Image (spheres, rainbow, N blue to C red):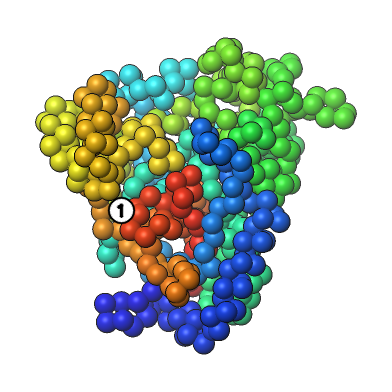
Amino acid sequence: MMNAASNPRQPYEHYHEWYEGQDRARLIAKSKEAENLFRKTGITFAVYGHEDSSEKLIPFDIIPRIISGREWRKLAQGIEQRVIALNAFLDDIYHKQEIIKAGRIPRELIERNEAFLPQMIGFKPPGGVYTHIVGTDIVRTGEDQFYVLEDNARTPSGVSYMLENRETMMQMFPELFHINKVRPVEDYPKLLRQSLASLAPPGCSGKPRVAVLTPGIFNSAYYEHAFLADMMGVELVEGSDLRVVDGKVKMRTTRGYEAIDVLYRRVDDDFLDPLTFRPDSALGIPGIMDVYRAGNITIANAPGTGISDDKAIYSYMPEIVEFYTGRKAMLENVPTWRCSEEDSLKYVLEHLSELVVKEVHGSGGYGMLVGPTASKKECAAFAEKLKARPSNYIAQPTLSLSTVPIMVNKGIAPRHVDLRPYVLVSDKVQIIPGGLTRVALKEGSLVVNSSQGGGTKDTWVLED
């Protein structure tokens, strides 16, 4: 909020003036009110494998994160370039593999990758779009310095929190939205439905029927699945509600089975079709991949997109962006050591206490080591894991992440944050002006994931 001279930064000027005139007791009461709103609405998440696996409220901070129109334009241009490159990369690796032939990416990194699906080779999804919904995680290290931390193109989550955070803030502080010209995010469900429907398969006649496929109520993100289906006005279905009939995927209704044209799936590839992938899956639809390859359904995001989430692939993103767009990446990657390479592994093992080490397929803050906060014993144990499976890990420096203010008992205090803007891809790229700001609530912590004790806050992108 403040610059080095202890004056409010330009995007925060109106907010800071408002904040200075507020009664502290009122803000504390509003913070509790927000918690009650979240509890009544049922905005929860679950943590797998946790001793207490009950549904938890995601902590919400009432001080918004504010981004100027100028800052947002820079981010949006870089995100659009990256998403276009990711989609071109996926199309290429499942078809001509020009990037491999050009020697820009090792063949084994693709073909030995568990997220690469041979079943997608030679198949082009409807509209040529693989990444219908993308969440790009971004961190800031300086006034004009942004880095992409990771790409989420498999099944990016968290957009329901972005929408609920905004609704909560508008309900509690309507006056702030008169003082500040904040760009809207609440039309995301409408835009999502329009974007999905625009990519209906060629065989679709009439208005496309869209549905959201959920693994069910025990999934950690079930709240979001139900929320998005409700907000889009479409059906929420489980695998048991669907079957393949006459070459189409059909949904059980009171009028019999009716065809679905677009399936926004929140089920991982492995569980999507027991006839193609895991035969023990009870979450998917037997035969859906045959219907998909026949061009009779659109699956969003396309099966096989998960390879672009791989953190070893991430380390090649500057080359990927330049290869497919002909331009240098506008948004930089965090410098990354690939532990599969002998020299990199040697460096990482020698500097373990200074680095962040992550699993290439990891998510949610699990399976990682934050060297500067780890004990010698933890570092030694992790070194053995690294030596046993070096190709399973990448390492990065610990960045000096930007901070934003949060409400604490004594007033406000700085905490580290990241940002996940959401992108919709159809015949155009639409970037929602805002996103999910995740905040590390523990003092000094760099881990923002809700499963690791992080919280969220509303993200404001200002009109110029």
Q: Is residue 346 above or below residue 409?
A: above
How many marks on residues? 1
Image coordinates for residue 325, horizontal then vertical, percent: 31, 44
Q: In the image, what residue occupies the spot 57% across and 73% down?
A: 28
Asked if residue 301 can be seen in this view, the reply is: no
Image coordinates for residue 42, horizontal then vertical, percent: 68, 51
Left or right position of 250 against 435: right
Q: Nearer the viewer, residue 125 or 10?
A: 10
SS at badge 1: strand
Left or right position of 340 against 251: left
Q: In the image, what residue occupies the spot 70% across and 18% down?
A: 244
Q: Amino acid at mark 1?
A: Tyr
Q: Is residue 74 above or below residue 462?
A: above
- Quarter of the picture containing the C terminus is bottom left
Q: Nearer the viewer, residue 241 or 377?
A: 377
> Of all residues shown, which one is farthest toward the bottom?
21
State the residue position of label 1: 147
Image coordinates for residue 357, horizontal then vertical, percent: 27, 38
Q: Is residue 107 above or below residue 401?
A: above
Q: In the image, what residue occupies the spot 72% across and 23% down?
A: 240
Asked if residue 27 can be seen in this view, the reply is: yes
Q: In the image, what residue occupies the spot 73% across and 16% down?
A: 246
